[in-house]
Image (cartoon, rainbow, N blue to C red):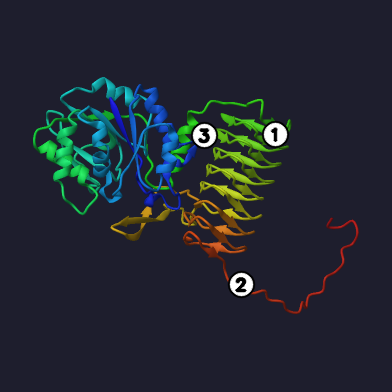
């Protein structure tokens, strides 16, 4: 069976993360993990559909790649881009950003038939803002209901972008007939097929599924990969005798763990990274070539490559590549009122960018950054703040709003010096020492 892997998305909702396909986990980009999982499941013919923005990087993965010219056409444009490669062979359409455990591929292979399509569907116990499947008494899909109001879901089955199409030509013809200024042409074409009697069956799936839709989902994926991580201390890693490492911890080649440092698993420490004296890393993913400096703490956070900390606290945060924090800088991750944290999310359609506050469902969420960022000393970040790539953030300020990419954020403050009217009594030797 052929596989079309969708990777052309521009990741607007993931900002300041530039391309979620290349977010690294355990030293490899996410899309490389996805291709590896497909190959392990027995799929050999895999076509990756990308966009102009990531085509060069996608071509390094060893799979055939095609460019989707008009990204506003969404999934319908991707399928039509791949049509001449698919021909009329049955194919599996997979999103590179929907991560499932390997049992999903085995389940799909077991139920695939020549005359019936399949759509993998997550069985949810609580409301999820996605596409719900309406099912007929015969168990066939009759409609995809996008983001119904809570309590009005047609079923407990949420659409996962892992769709088996046994009759591609019928799908291509339906796609070509759809004219819409929205990005749901693919869903409209499926509705045409449902209404015309083409059978598509929902395939309920209760295993792990995590869509990478918003920045904080990177923490869910991090935890998934850390849970499946095998403990490893390679010979190329150096660990001081006084360092303490507990739980499932993977140290990659060239890692150095200095005196009295503590690492509490599950945790991944990337190649050539230094965990300095008295540093604490717990339940976190640290990339390659980082320095977690003296006295720094990193807790439940995703940290990219080349990140430097200097006596900092990084909690429940997503930090990009090449970010440096000045001494004393901390990330706030918990509201004073202990309520859910909301994050401002970008959306773009037809060249227009809008911002919308999204509830994260989390009461703990720290800083979210892009890459190539420098932060001064003693700066504090409020929960859920985002910093765009190629930015400077000045010293001694409290930042409670997002910083766009390519910015220099700093605050105004004035030093006040006045006469001291209090007498300073010298200490008596041996007292108050």
With 6 as the anchor, is 131 left or right in this view?
left
CB under 8 Å between callouts 2 and 1? no
| Mark positioned earlier in the residue sequence (2 or 1) | 1
Q: Identify the element where label 1 is drawn.
A: loop
**Residue at the (48%, 48%) spot, across then down:** 364
Q: Quadrant of residue 94?
A: top left
The foreground one among 2 and 316 is 2
Which of label 1 and label 3 is nearer to you? 3
| Mark positioned earlier in the residue sequence (3 or 2) | 3
With 354 as the anchor, is 201 left or right in this view?
left
Residue 89 in the image: state x and y as whole percent: 22, 27
**Residue at the (44%, 49%) spot, across then down:** 18
User: On the image, numbered disc 3 is attached to which residue?
Assistant: 26
Residue 215 in the image: state x and y as whole percent: 43, 48
With 187 as the anchor, is 15 left or right in this view?
right
Q: Tell me the distance, in whole angstroms, between the alpha carbons under discs 2 and 1.
A: 41 Å
Q: Tell me the distance, in whole angstroms, between the alpha carbons under discs 1 and 3.
A: 22 Å
Q: Identify the element where label 2 is drawn.
A: loop
Task: Point out the image quarter for the C terminus.
Answer: bottom right
Q: Which mark is residue 243?
A: 1
Please rate how many residues cluster around mark 1, counting C-alpha atoms within 10 Å: few if below 14, some from 14 to 19, many from 20: some
| Mark positioned earlier in the residue sequence (1 or 3) | 3
Q: Is residue 153 above or below residue 111?
A: below
CB under 8 Å between callouts 1 and 3? no
User: On the image, numbered disc 2 is attached to which residue?
Assistant: 413
Task: Point out the image quarter for the N terminus.
Answer: top left
Residue 139 in the image: state x and y as whole percent: 15, 29
Farthest-out residue, front: 84
Q: Tell me the distance, in whole angstroms, between the alpha carbons under discs 3 and 2.
A: 42 Å
The foreground one among 378 and 51 is 51
């Amino acid at each position: 069976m052929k596989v079309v892997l969708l990777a052309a998305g521009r990741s607007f909702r993931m900002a300041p993360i530039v391309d979620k396909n290349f977010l690294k986990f355990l030293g490899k980009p996410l899309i490389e993990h996805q291709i590896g999982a497909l190959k392990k499941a027995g799929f050999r013919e895999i076509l990756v559909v990308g966009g102009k923005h990531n085509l060069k990087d996608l071509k390094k993965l060893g799979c055939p790649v095609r460019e989707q010219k008009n990204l506003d056409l969404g999934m319908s444009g991707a399928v039509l881009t791949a049509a001449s490669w698919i021909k009329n062979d049955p194919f599996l359409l997979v999103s590179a950003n929907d991560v499932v455990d390997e049992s999903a591929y085995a389940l799909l292979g077991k139920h695939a038939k020549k005359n019936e399509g399949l759509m993998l569907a997550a069985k949810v116990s609580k409301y999820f803002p996605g596409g719900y499947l309406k099912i007929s008494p015969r168990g066939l899909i009759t409609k995809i209901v996008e983001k119904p109001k809570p309590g009005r879901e047609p079923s407990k089955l949420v659409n996962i972008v892992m769709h088996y199409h046994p009759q591609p030509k019928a799908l291509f013809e339906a796609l070509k007939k759809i004219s819409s200024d929205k990005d749901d042409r693919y869903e409209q074409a499926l509705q045409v097929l449902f209404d015309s009697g083409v059978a598509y069956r929902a395939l309920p799936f209760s295993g792990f599924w995590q869509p990478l839709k918003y920045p904080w989902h990177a923490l869910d994926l991090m935890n998934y990969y850390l849970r499946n991580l095998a403990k490893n201390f390679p010979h190329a890693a150096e660990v001081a005798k006084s360092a303490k490492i507990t739980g499932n911890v993977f140290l990659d080649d060239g890692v150095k763990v200095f005196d009295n440092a503590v690492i509490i698993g599950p945790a991944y420490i990337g190649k050539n990274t230094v965990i300095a004296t008295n540093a604490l890393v717990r339940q976190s993913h640290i990339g390659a070539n980082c320095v977690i400096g003296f006295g720094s703490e990193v807790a439940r956070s995703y940290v990219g490559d080349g990140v430097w900390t200097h006596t900092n606290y990084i909690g429940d945060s997503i930090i990009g590549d090449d970010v440096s924090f000045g001494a004393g800088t901390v990330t706030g991750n918990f509201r004073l009122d202990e309520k859910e944290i909301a994050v401002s999310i970008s959306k773009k359609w037809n060249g227009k960018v809008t911002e919308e506050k999204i509830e994260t469902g989390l009461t703990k969420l720290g800083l979210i950054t892009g890459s190539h960022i420098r932060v001064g000393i003693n700066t504090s970040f409020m929960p859920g703040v985002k910093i765009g790539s190629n930015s400077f953030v000045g010293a001694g300020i409290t930042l409670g709003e997002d910083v766009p990419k390519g910015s220099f954020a700093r605050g105004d403050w004035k030093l006040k010096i006045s006469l001291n009217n209090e007498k300073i009594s010298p200490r008596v030797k041996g007292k108050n020492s």
